[in-house]
């Protein structure tokens, strides 16, 4: 399926549910105010979000979502991650949900700041302006949707563009096609849409000013989506320009996509990986400009590998955009060393058989961390080399609730989509009032052809009064993994794979409170050779550590001591769920929710 075919598709007129409907009365029209919304302290301040006109029985009683963060495509999605605040406004609210009053009003006060980290990704209002989003929960109906921009002092506008970088827009007709039919193009991770179609920040360089040969690496990512044409995701990141020294060169980049089918089950998927994307011809020789070297790309043509990485939208030899790169350097180079000792710089490369170090950052399930982290007398502790980080913390909890970092014990590496990694250490969730301590230890990732399994040792320890005996289950499969939309970041002897989709393997694994296929936290794994320096992955967690709210606004374990009758959830049901998790789903839950509701 190529570009011409899709360009010929005529979009039907989108009919939104609110168009053509009689105007609602002022008393029932949803309205949202945010105070303050401007002049916010970048270091952190509280805002109050108020809503009126949200009828408690509207949206089938499912409630309304409130999220704070950048303009992400998944802002209305049930399992969206990466937001600084995620709350559900609902009648008969439980846990951390926000009560919706009988008159349709609600109020929420939350702290916000101009920069935060969630699921290993840092978001900054200076490059990705933040807003308060309100929407109907778990529905395509846009009746209740609103967006209120937040303005931080000294933030909200992109910083002045650097004088160095790669100015290159991929292909002008591709950008026009995406824009014409209502798609999006998002530049992030340092890439910017100005001052040219895209500017990619300059990174490391091996360019030799004496020979004119070598490479210059650039950072950043641009992601295109065009959902009406079933283009769910096409991303290009970390371009690198290599000079052959004869006026020609090549451009390589990390490219990934998911096309056609459905958004959740695309027909064509490419896990982001590096490819020689384009052949280059330079306009004249590189020239000196102060402390920088400037080179003009006169022509860029798609390679065979690049065409395949573009899913056949364009054939090989298609003309791409010209461009320009500016990077620190000096034409003419420096005099060779006078020492007779040969200098043979050795590159640090992660190759098969070279894996010796690394780590896994994974939080299991954020709502569970928040559930344990909010109880009096509870603890979440890491040992055996594992650490509690400040990544993706649950806000407002008395104990650290960030994701966990497990050190690599052993592993075998073949490629970015094919490796086995055994990690060490353990994390213990202790809830004395509920008679249990749950221990997750020694997680293991087994990946082949871009999919795999996350397993771990699970132990449920009990105390007197518990409705179940203790359980110990080593090596139980906890999650199915999918790297189709993961982000692969190569480095000097390192490979980091982040945003790996993880889904619970069994509907019985948590007594029906979590369903088979429910999203767990997305793991991030870093693998490295012995010569490499591991990139940072968060600091040990503690008071004041940054983090956003949970990805799912409906609490997965709706347990409130002293109020079981109103929630329909008994301690026995929650406890059996933990026991089944430890048993890896090998037991069948015979006390289902209807039986649990007999406690009412």
Image (tube, rainbow, N blue to C red):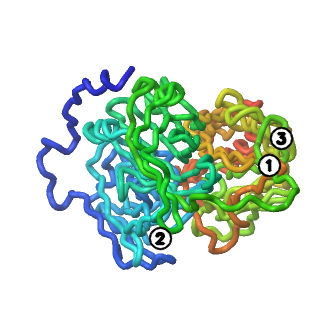
Residue 114's tag is 2
Q: Position of residue 71 (x, y in %)?
A: 39, 55
Instruction: Decide which of 35, 361 is in the foreground and name it.
Output: 361
Q: Is residue 219 left or right of residue 28?
A: right
Would you name the residue on which mark 1 appears? 346
Element marked by disc 2:
loop
Residue contact at pointers 2 and 3, CB within 8 angstroms: no
Disc 3 versus disc 1: nearer the observer? 1
Asked if 435 appears above or below 453 in the picture, the reply is below
Which residue is depicted at the point 44% across and 33% down? 301
The CA span between labels 2 and 3 is 40 Å
Which residue is depicted at the point 34% across and 30% down? 229
Point out the tag, 1 or 2, that comes first from the N-terminus: 2
Q: Residues within 10 Å of mark 3 (few under 14, many from 20)?
A: some
Q: Is residue 215 visible?
A: no
Residue contact at pointers 3 and 1, CB within 8 angstroms: no
Instruction: Decide which of 338, 302 is in the foreground and name it.
Output: 338
Disc 2 versus disc 3: nearer the observer? 3
């Amino acid at each position: 399926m190529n570009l011409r075919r899709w360009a010929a598709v005529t979009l039907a007129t989108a009919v939104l549910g609110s168009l053509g409907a009689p105007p609602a009365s002022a008393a029932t029209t949803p309205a949202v105010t945010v105070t303050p919304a401007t002049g916010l302290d970048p270091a952190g301040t509280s805002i109050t979000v108020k809503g009126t006109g949200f009828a408690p029985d509207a949206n089938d009683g499912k409630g309304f979502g409130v999220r704070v963060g950048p303009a992400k495509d998944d802002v209305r999605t049930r399992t969206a991650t990466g937001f600084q605040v995620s709350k559900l406004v609902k009648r008969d609210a439980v846990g951390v949900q926000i009560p919706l009053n009988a008159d349709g009003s609600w109020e929420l006060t939350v702290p916000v700041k101009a920069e935060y980290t969630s699921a290993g990704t840092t978001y900054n209002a200076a490059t990705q302006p933040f807003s308060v989003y309100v929407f109907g929960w778990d529905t395509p109906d846009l009746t209740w949707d609103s967006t209120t921009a937040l303005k931080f002092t000294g933030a909200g506008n992109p910083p002045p563009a650097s004088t160095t970088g790669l100015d290159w827009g991929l292909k002008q007709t591709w950008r026009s096609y995406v824009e014409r039919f209502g798609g999006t193009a998002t530049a992030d991770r340092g890439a910017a849409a100005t001052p040219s179609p895209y500017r990619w920040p300059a990174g490391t360089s091996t360019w030799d000013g004496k020979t004119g040969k070598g490479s210059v690496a650039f950072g950043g990512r641009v992601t295109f989506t065009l959902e009406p044409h079933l283009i769910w995701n096409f991303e290009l990141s970390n371009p690198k320009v290599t000079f052959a020294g004869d006026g020609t060169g090549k451009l390589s980049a990390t490219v990934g996509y998911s096309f056609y089918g459905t958004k959740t089950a695309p027909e064509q998927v490419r896990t982001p990986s590096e490819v020689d994307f384009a052949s280059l011809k330079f306009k004249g020789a590189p020239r000196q400009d102060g402390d920088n070297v400037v080179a003009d790309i006169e022509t860029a043509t798609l390679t065979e590998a690049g065409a395949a990485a573009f899913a056949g939208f364009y054939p090989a030899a298609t003309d791409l955009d010209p461009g320009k790169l500016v990077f620190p350097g000096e034409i003419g180079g420096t005099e060779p060393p006078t020492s007779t000792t040969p200098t043979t710089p050795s590159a640090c490369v992660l190759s098969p058989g070279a894996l010796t170090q690394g780590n896994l950052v994974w939080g299991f399930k954020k709502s569970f961390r928040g559930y344990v982290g909010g109880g009096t007398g509870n603890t979440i502790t890491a040992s055996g080399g594992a650490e509690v980080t400040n990544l993706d913390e649950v806000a407002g909890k008395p104990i650290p609730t960030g994701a966990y970092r497990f050190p690599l014990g052993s592993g075998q590496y073949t490629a970015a989509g094919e490796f086995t990694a055994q990690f060490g250490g353990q994390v213990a969730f202790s809830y004395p009032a509920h008679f249990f301590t749950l221990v997750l230890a020694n997680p293991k990732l087994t990946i082949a052809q871009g999919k795999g399994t996350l397993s771990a040792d699970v132990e449920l320890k009990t105390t007197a009064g518990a409705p179940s005996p203790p359980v110990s289950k080593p090596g139980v499969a906890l999650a199915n993994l999918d790297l189709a939309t993961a982000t692969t970041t190569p480095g000097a002897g390192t490979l980091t794979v982040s945003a790996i989709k993880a889904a619970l393997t069994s509907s019985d694994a948590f007594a029906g409170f979590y369903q088979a296929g429910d999203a767990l936290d997305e793991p991030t794994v870093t693998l490295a050779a012995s010569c490499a320096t591991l990139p940072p992955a968060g600091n040990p967690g503690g008071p004041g550590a940054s983090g956003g709210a949970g990805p799912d606004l409906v609490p997965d374990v709706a347990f409130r001591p002293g109020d079981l009758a109103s929630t329909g959830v008994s301690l026995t049901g929650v406890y059996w769920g933990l026991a089944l998790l430890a048993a890896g789903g090998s037991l069948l839950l015979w006390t289902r929710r209807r039986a649990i509701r007999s406690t009412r």
